[in-house]
Amino acid sequence: MKTLFVLASVIVVLFLAAPNKVEAQKRKAAAKPSSIDFVRRLDANRRLIENPKIKARLQQLLGRERFVFMFRRWNLGTPIKITNDALVETGCMSHFCDSTNFIIVIDITNNKFYVGIRDNDRIKIYSEKDSFPSLQIQRRIQHWKDYGSDSGEDDK
């Protein structure tokens, strides 16, 4: 009888826990910016780097030290641009824009982040694992590397 009670209790717990796992997976999937709808809900008056969901992904991609470097020095920036399912924002360190600047590119279709950091004219590009940027994103990043800003043009 005692064994039957324990078995019934386990079944009830498993039955009640199953929907919670499904709900948790749905919430986790919804937290990633995987569609243009997420981007449209971004606050245009805030930098991408300040959005909690994006901030978490950037911290994971860059590591704490590089993220803090970028966050503290991103004083000036361009408005967020969306073209061809790529979201782009650039920024720089006040009074040192030529030598210390940044680009964030989010491939909305593939849900991948790319970040460029120019620190005293040394450039480092960060990309998420298993990501292959489209030709348009490659051009955007190359333009930033060459000129320190995004072209803002729709690359065909």
Image: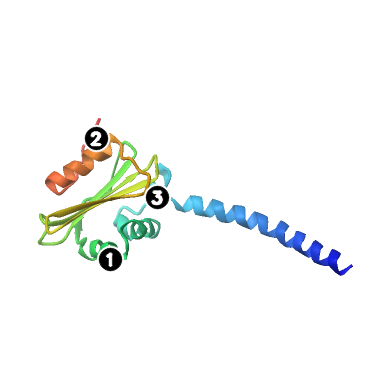
Numbered tag placed on residue 65 in the rendering = 1
Please, which residue is most extreme toward the right here?
1
Q: CA distance from mark 2 to mark 3?
A: 22 Å
Q: Residue at x 10, y 54 (%)?
A: 98
> Residue 42, percent across and down?
37, 52
Towards the viewer: 7 or 45: 7
Quadrant where the N terminus sits is bottom right
Residue at 49% x, 50% y: name it.
Answer: 30
Which residue type carries mark 1? Glu
- Residue 41 shows which numbered tag? 3
Q: Secondary structure at mark 1?
A: helix
Where residue 78 appears, x then y in whole percent? 21, 51
Disc 3 packing (10 Å; few <14; some 14–19; many ≥20): few
Note whether residue 46 is visible.
Answer: no
**Decide: marks 2, 1 in contact (CB < 8 A)?**
no
Residue 149, x across and y down, in percent: 16, 47
In this picture, residue 58 sits left or right of residue 140: right
In the image, 57: left or right of 89? Answer: right
Could you say whether the residue bearing mark 2 is in a helix, strand or loop? loop
- Identify the disc placed on residue 21: none
How many numbered tags mark residues here? 3
Above or below: residue 115 compared with residue 85? below
Tag nearer the camera, 3 or 1: 1
Front: mark 2 or 1 = 1
The residue at which mark 2 appears reads as: 154
